[in-house]
Image (tube, coloured by chain):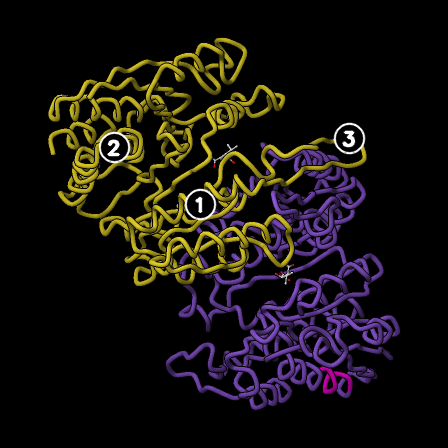
Chain colours: A yellow, B purple
């Protein structure tokens, strides 16, 4: 298989961890006889510094000619006081919208070696294995009117039935490949958009009689992610609720440094990125945990290229390195040997 | 002091726990020589059953002639499939809006005797002592247009500068009486209303040079409530973020059955209610934990009547009962004696 991958390193540790992911992709390419052509381009703070824009046209052109996008992370204190249009994260929002990447998939899985790092008691998290499916191009993020005056401000939460249908279908399809349960999160006791959301879920349900469906209010979901996190399989929700709940979920297992994400559309084209940020405090030190970026590359193999076996090989390799007693500075587990970003990556490739 | 209190028991355990709170108020009245006149009225599911409306006019009339409102809880499976206007929680939303109760205060404090019940590791929660200040009458809850058609839906998030100012001021005032720190939560990288929110906080800050101020994004706040909950003092945020974050915060210390809340306006008039719901599964069994309702009555004494000494007496009494080794079924701590709702209440009164 021949594929072109746009690599947008972005800022901070984004640079280091995407290098690790690319190395792993190259090694998978060799072993399984695929050719991955890597095309680099700018995004985020570095793009602002070099071109004056968080998402330059050249970057869009590179992505358009690629089969998938691998992203590091964007942002840092240097750009924190920029006017809104010149903020690194605008690049991220713009790329999602430009390519219509409506489905953000965020798996959260407990890793036995990381239980110590979890803020929750072990018995609550050890069975956690969920996938948050967040709608990514609608809702309050892009609805109009959206404006601020001296005396007030307005944002608009809009969803078309179609937008809800496609993300809900995605969730049902994913649940079929997993534990067969969909939890739909809304605020139907207050929001009209949530009522429509709930209606659509009820409609789609009849096409998936094998899937168990539950509806839960967003406030109750925020509680249950802490009190019964292992009760979830697939969680599907709108853009902003998904933003909040997926970040909440990302810390419960103590494995934030390992969490990948993918943002895809119907045809399989997608953007893959670690859940963690640019971590400016440790950038350039070669100590960042590359697992999340490597596992994001694995998601790319699976969801954009349909290479299930190759994806599984990458995942197993990463988990084996932990099982063998290695880790990076973010974990610091007694008895484990702390490796640098590059040394950890080499271990993954070895496996 | 002579005060009239509207008591709206509501549904489920709301009936039992408000009885406990009223008993405690009567005993405080006797001891400190105040007269509390109790006026009961209907709300929620029971009001729907008896009058056809979740918030009957007679209830509003009783509340209008009172100095404060004590509420139990509303809702239950019986009304879960009612059309939206006939749902018990509409009564709650309507009463908040009718009286302009814009500030929802929700303290969350770790109780040593309850540490076992916390889903988080003890070292993370044992110092937790925060107050969430949620804006309660604006934002997505009431903004127009708000409508659903066959093909789409819209909700509107609006805030006027004035609405933001008054809640932010409230947060600063509360921080002065506490640890002197305000964490303002928004989504300023995406929402215009959040940009205005952040602007207002920055402006008000100069009037409170003694208060430390931090801004944090709602997604990051959802993480930090789990990873560093004791870093917070006063958290101030808009209506829906406050709904999600305060429920999330309510479970971290394992003491949900003890958490009170108050919803107040500038002149001190307010509505006081436990954070927990109507718990239909244990309703009528005389086993519900009355602590949250009793502590809500204590908040009433303090915030609506200015009776600080009396409020402190109630709080100390509740904490003492736990220290003395008693609890209710929701806790079940080894070595503790489980009491019924009424027996627990009598212990509190004794103390
Ligand atoms: C940077 C920000 C705009 C973004 C979002 O809110 O979507 C981020 O929090 C995320 O979840 O990817
Ligand atoms: C019942 C519901 C409308 C309400 C809200 O969202 O405000 C509840 O969750 C609360 O927090 O008091």
Magenta segment's dominant SS is helix
Do callouts 2 and 3 point to residues on the same chain?
yes
Q: Sequence order check: which comes first, mark 1 or mark 3?
A: 3
How packed mark 2 is, by other alpha carbons closer than 10 Å (few <14, some 14-19, many 20 or more), is few
What mark, if any, has residue B155 been given in the picture? Answer: none
Q: How far apart are marks 2 and 1 (CA)?
A: 25 Å
**Mark 1 beta carbon near ligand 1 (under 8 Å):** yes
Q: Sequence order check: which comes first, mark 2 or mark 1?
A: 1
Q: In the rendered structure, are the residues bearing label 2 and label 3 in contact, judged by CB atoms less than 8 Å apart?
A: no
- Quarter occupied by the C terminus of chain A: top left
Q: In the rendered structure, are the residues bearing label 1 and label 3 in contact, judged by CB atoms less than 8 Å apart?
A: no
Camera-near label (2 vs 3) is 2
Provide the secondary structure element on which disc 2 rests.
loop
**Mark 3 beta carbon near ligand 1 (under 8 Å):** no
Using the image, determine if residue B309 lies above or below residue B344. Answer: above
| Chain at numbered mark 1 | A
Q: Sequence order check: which comes first, mark 2 or mark 3?
A: 3
Residue B98, image x, y percentages? 81, 61
Do callouts 1 and 3 point to residues on the same chain?
yes
Residue B310 in view here: no
| Residue bearing mark 3 | A149
Asked whether B196 or A315 is in front, the reply is: A315
| Residue bearing mark 2 | A306
How packed mark 3 is, by other alpha carbons closer than 10 Å (few <14, some 14-19, many 20 or more), is few
| Chain at numbered mark 2 | A
Asked if residue A135 is among those painted magenta in the image, a careful observer would answer: no
- Span highlighted in magenta in the image: B25-29
Where residue A80 sits, quadrant-wise, is top right
- Residue at point 36%, 26% (across, down): A13
| Residue bearing mark 1 | A246
């Amino acid at each position: 298989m021949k594929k072109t991958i746009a690599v947008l390193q972005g800022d901070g540790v984004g640079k280091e961890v995407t290098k690790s992911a690319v190395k792993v992709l190259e090694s998978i390419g060799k072993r399984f006889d695929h050719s991955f052509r890597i095309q680099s381009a700018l995004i985020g703070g570095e793009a602002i510094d070099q071109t004056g824009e968080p998402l330059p046209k050249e970057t869009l052109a590179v992505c358009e000619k690629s089969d998938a996008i691998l992203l590091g992370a964007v942002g840092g204190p240097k750009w924190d006081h920029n006017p809104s249009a010149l903020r690194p994260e605008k690049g991220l929002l713009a790329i999602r919208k430009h390519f219509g990447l409506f489905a953000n998939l965020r798996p959260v899985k407990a890793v036995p070696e990381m239980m110590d790092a979890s803020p929750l008691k072990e018995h609550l998290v050890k069975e956690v294995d969920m996938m948050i499916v967040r709608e990514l191009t609608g809702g309050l993020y892009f609805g109009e009117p959206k404006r601020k005056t001296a005396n007030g401000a307005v944002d608009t939460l809009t969803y078309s039935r179609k937008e809800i249908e496609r993300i809900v279908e995605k969730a049902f399809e994913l649940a079929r490949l997993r534990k067969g349960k969909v939890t739909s999160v809304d605020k139907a006791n207050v929001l009209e958009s949530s009522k429509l959301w709930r209606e659509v879920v009820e409609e789609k349900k009849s096409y998936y009689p094998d899937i168990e469906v539950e509806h839960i209010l967003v406030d109750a979901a925020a509680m249950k992610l802490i009190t019964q996190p292992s009760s979830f399989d697939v969680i599907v929700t709108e853009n902003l609720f998904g933003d909040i709940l997926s970040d909440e979920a990302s810390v419960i297992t103590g494995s934030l440094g390992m969490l990948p994400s993918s943002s895809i559309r119907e045809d399989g084209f997608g953007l893959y990125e670690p859940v963690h940020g640019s971590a400016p405090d440790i950038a350039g030190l070669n100590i960042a945990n590359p697992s999340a970026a490597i596992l994001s590359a694995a998601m790319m193999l699976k969801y954009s290229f349909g290479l299930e076996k190759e994806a599984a090989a990458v995942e197993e390799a990463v988990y084996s390195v932990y099982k063998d007693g290695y880790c990076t500075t973010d974990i610091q587990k007694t008895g484990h040997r702390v490796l640098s970003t590059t040394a950890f990556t080499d271990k993954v490739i070895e496996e």
